[in-house]
Amino acid sequence: MNDTELSTAVRDSVAEIHAATPVEAIISRGRGVRARRRIPVAAGALTVAAVAALAVTALVPAGHLGLVPSGRPGLASPGTRGSSHSNRVQLAAWTVAERANGDIDVTINQLKDPAGLQATLRADGLPVSVSFSGPIVGGSCQPYTASRGTLRTVAQFHSDSFAIDPSALPSGTGVAIFDEPGTGLPLHPSPAVAPRGAPPLHPSTGSLLSGLDGPLAIGLVYASPQCTG
Amino acid sequence: MGVGTQQLDFAEFYRSAADECLRAVLVSVGDQETARELVDEAFARAWASWRTVSGHPAPKAWVVRTALNTGISRWRRRRREVPVSDPATVTDRPAPDAAVASPVDPQIMAALMRLPARQRQVVALRLILDLDTNGTAEALGIAPGTVMAHLGRAMAALRHDLQPELRQESRS
C-alpha cells in the first residue's frame, strides 16, 4: 500500500460522517459565548463604579450612603425597618454571578421569581428552564438521560449555591431547575432529596442532582426554543 | 460588516466546512459524540469571533485547533473535579450496539487511535483538512520538519497496522 492509497483509505474511513447541527443552533450557542465574554468587562465596569462610589462616599456628609449591588440579585429591595436610612437591603431571592472561567454561580435564598431567574440565566447564554411551582416538563420539554458524572460536570452544588458550567452541557441539551423532585422531570420515580445540611444525594440509578437547602433539583433536558429559550 | 452579512458569511462557511472539521476532529479524538460536541463549540466560538476568524488564513484549521484545545481543557477540568474510579459511572449512553452499522471504518479508526495524539492531529490536518506542511505546522504551533516527521511515522504505523487486513481481504 503506497502513501496515496493509505491517505485515501483514511479519508474514506470517515467520509460518511456529516455534521448534523443546524447553523441556527450554532449561532444561538455563539451568542451565549459572546454573552459570557462580556461579563468580565461588565464586572470590571462595576468594580470601577464601586470604587468611584466609595470615593464619593468618603467625600460627602453622612446620610448619603449608597449600596452597590454585586452580581444580579432578583427581587432585591431596600428595607427600612423603622429607620430613615436606606442602608439595609433584604436578601435577594436569588443571585446570579458569572465567574471568569464562564461558570455561572446561582445562589437561591427563596424560591421566588422563577421567570426572572430563567431570563437572567438565558441572557447569560444558558439554555435553561426554571420552575418553582411544579412540573417543568410538559409537551415542550423532553428529559435527557445523563449519567451522574455528566451532571456533576455540568452542576456543582456548594453549601449555599450551585454552579453551572455551560460548556460542559452535552450538545443539544439544556438545564432544568425545579423545586419539586418527583413532579419535575419524570425520569425516575423517587429522586432523593438531601435534608438540610446533609451532602447532596445522588440516586444510584437516577440522573438528577438534588440537595442544596431544600427540595431543589437540577436535570438535563433537550434544548428547544419552547423549553429552554 | 453588517450583522446580516456576517450571519450569511458564517452560515456559508459552516455549511462548507462543518463536515471536514468534524471528520478531522473525529480522527483526533476517536469518539463521534465527543467530536460533534467539540466541533459545535468551536463553531460557536468562531461565530462569536467571526471578524477575526473570517480573516484567518485557514479558518477550518482555526476551528479544528479550537475544538482540540477545548477537548484538552475539558479533560483537564474533569480530571481535577471528577475522579473517575469506575468509567462506567460517567458513561452517558449505553454501550453501542454492535449490530448497528457505524459510518466509521472500525479497523482504520482503531489503528488511528493507537497513534500518539500529536500524530493523529497531523494526520487530521494533513489528510482530512488537506492543509500543506506549513499550514499544519502553523495550526499546531510546531516546526514544519516536525510535521513531516510525525506524518512519516504515522503513515508507517498505519501501514504496518492495516497491511495484514488488506492482505487478508485480497486473499478472500
Image (spheres, helix red, strand yellow):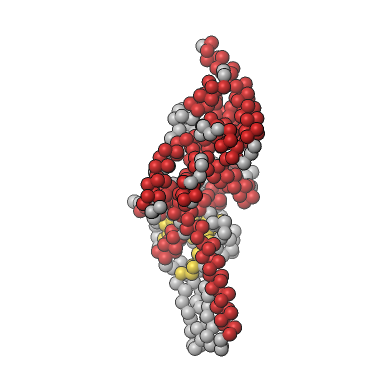
Residue B171 visible (yes or no): yes
Q: Where's residue A167, x and y in %?
A: 52, 51
Residue farthest to the left, as pictured: A139
Q: Residue A25 vs residue A162: left or right?
A: left
Q: Position of residue A107 (x, y in %)?
A: 52, 65
* Residue plotted at (54% across, 62% down): A40
The residue under the point 46% across, 29% down is A15
Instruction: Return the residue nearer the eye: A76 or B122.
Output: B122
B127 or A148: nearer the eye?
B127
Tell me residue A92's x, y (percent): 49, 72
| Residue A33 locus on image (x, y percent) | 48, 54
| Number of on-image labels | 0
Query: At 56% from the left edge and 14% from the top edge, which residue is drawn?
Result: B167
| For residue B140, side relative to residue A180 (left or right) | right
Would residue A188 be visible to someone looking at this image?
A: no
Front residue (pair B38, A1): A1
- Using the image, determine if residue A9 lies above or below residue A37: above
Residue at the spot 46% in from the left edge and 55% down from the top edge: A32
Q: Nearer the viewer, residue A114 or A206?
A: A114
